[in-house]
Amino acid sequence: MSSASAISSLLSSASTTGTSGIDISNILAAVAGAQTPGINVTSAVSAAVTAAQAPEQVWQNDQTTLSSQMSDLQSIQSATSSLQTDMQNLNSLSGPLSSRTVTSSNVTAVTATAAEGTTLGNHQVAVSNLATTASWYSGEQSNATAALPSGSFTITTASGTSTTINTGSNGDVTLNDVVADINSQNLGITASVITDANGARLSLVSRNSGSAANFTVTSGSSSIGFTQAVVGNNASLTVDGVPVSSATNTVTGAIAGVTLNLLSTNSTGTPVDLSVASNTTQISTAVNQFVTDYNSAVTLLNQQYSFSTSSGTEGDLASDPTIASLQQALGSIATYTTSSASGISSLNDLGISMNTDGTLAVDSTTLGSALSNNPTGVQNFLQGTALNGFANTANNELSSFTDPSDGAFTVDLSSMSAQNTDLTTEINNFQTNYIAPLQTSLTADYTKAEEALQSLPTQLAQIQAELGNSPSSSNG
């Protein structure tokens, strides 16, 4: 197309009547701008492409909404998973409800610990004597490296095994040598040298307490001599009136699940009272954690249904059926009740009440009283008779949302992700199949028009000449 034809095409909308009366200069000024004739091709193409991208902007807005929905849903999913963990914790046989504490009426005589799940109850312990560790010592020598007289001594264990140690020129020359010799033979005895103001002595101590670890030392031809310091004996005690003997002062098996730590004998003759009870601190912490996580989930849900005056809308998930279902499920959890003869049949009996916004509040005094005075009732409510109580019911309610394979959150997020992928494909196809060709075509068209406008002054002079207009006559 010639420059004249291009200009003719651009001016095709103008009237062709009275051609000799048209002022081509004015038309040029109107088309190209009074100061700088021409077209900004980049700006013109950009404006046209932007207008053509209107559908794409809608899809991008949809993606922004989907991204916000997915982020909000993932936050709610996380809060719900934390709440479900709390329920599983409260329903576990090794959880806080099974934790035990043991109190002693005389902590200077007997203390104790109890394993999880130990039967609650009270016991009496009377300690007649503590378990002792056998020990012997030798007569003094000037120092640990002084030469010992020739001779021997024999160590005999409670089982009757005897070991002879030779000293002096026929054996261990010094006390240090004796120590090394005995400790290398795995006799169940620890040898060492005790040094004080009087000199050095050989010390022999059983590695275990009790009568089975007792031993004796007899001097043969040795002149160093030995004295027994302590006889190895078992601890003697009664537990709830039953006599018990223990090789150590740490006694297990006398009370199922309880470990006794014997510290001294009952000098007053009064048995020590032990009370095995639920660990109220751990249970209270677990219950309060449940309330905290429940409130976090409810708060996130409330935000979705909160009307914004600035945007004139609710949250991005206000119409999502998963959110509506979760709200109902949380309400069902909070209002759970069961028939119980133990005096605890609802969360309210634990001091847990509902606020006007659906969150929960804990009365620590009521909760503490229930845990201290009715621990069995608390456990029966939370765990039921066969792990079928409140905690298990709540866990099952939440599983329909959190199940990683087909839970409501998984399905909802998967659907949103698929929608986002489809929109991305739509945008990419639109860009490839429509916007890119359009941009190429418009760039070519506007470039031709620009080239025509740039040659217009020359064409104008030719047209003026053809019309019989001279520069002077056109100005006259």
Image (tube, grey):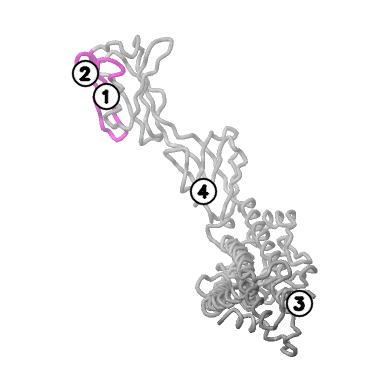
Q: Which of the two discs, 2 and 1, labels the residue nearer the N terminus?
A: 2
- Between the residue at mark 2 and the residue at mark 1, the CA separation in whole angstroms equals 10 Å
Name the front one of labels 3 and 2. Answer: 3
**Badge 3: residue crowd in 10 Å (few <14, some 14–19, many ≥20):** few
Disc 4 marks which residue?
258
- Between the residue at mark 4 and the residue at mark 3, the CA separation in whole angstroms equals 123 Å
Position of 369 relative to 401 (above/below): above
Residue 407 within the segment the image draws in magenta: no
Query: Disc 3, disc 2: CB below 8 Å?
Result: no
As shown in the figure, which amino acid type bears the numbered disc 1? Asp
Position of 144 relative to 165 (above/below): above
Q: Which of the two discs, 4 and 3, labels the residue nearer the N terminus?
A: 4
Q: Is residue 49 visible?
A: no
Local secondary structure at mark 2: loop
Disc 1 marks which residue?
181
Dot label at residue 473 = 3
- Between the residue at mark 4 and the residue at mark 1, the CA separation in whole angstroms equals 41 Å
- Between the residue at mark 1 and the residue at mark 3, the CA separation in whole angstroms equals 136 Å
Q: Is residue 189 visible?
A: yes
Local secondary structure at mark 1: helix
Local secondary structure at mark 4: strand
As shown in the figure, which amino acid type bears the numbered disc 3? Ser
Residue 160 within the segment the image draws in magenta: yes
As shown in the figure, which amino acid type bears the numbered disc 2? Gly
Q: Which of the two discs, 4 and 1, labels the residue nearer the N terminus?
A: 1
Residue visible at 75% across and 89% down in the picture: 18
Q: Which residues are magenta?
A: 150-177
Classify residue 184 by image quadrant: top left
- Where's residue 245, x and y in %? 44, 41
- Between the residue at mark 2 and the residue at mark 4, the CA separation in whole angstroms equals 49 Å
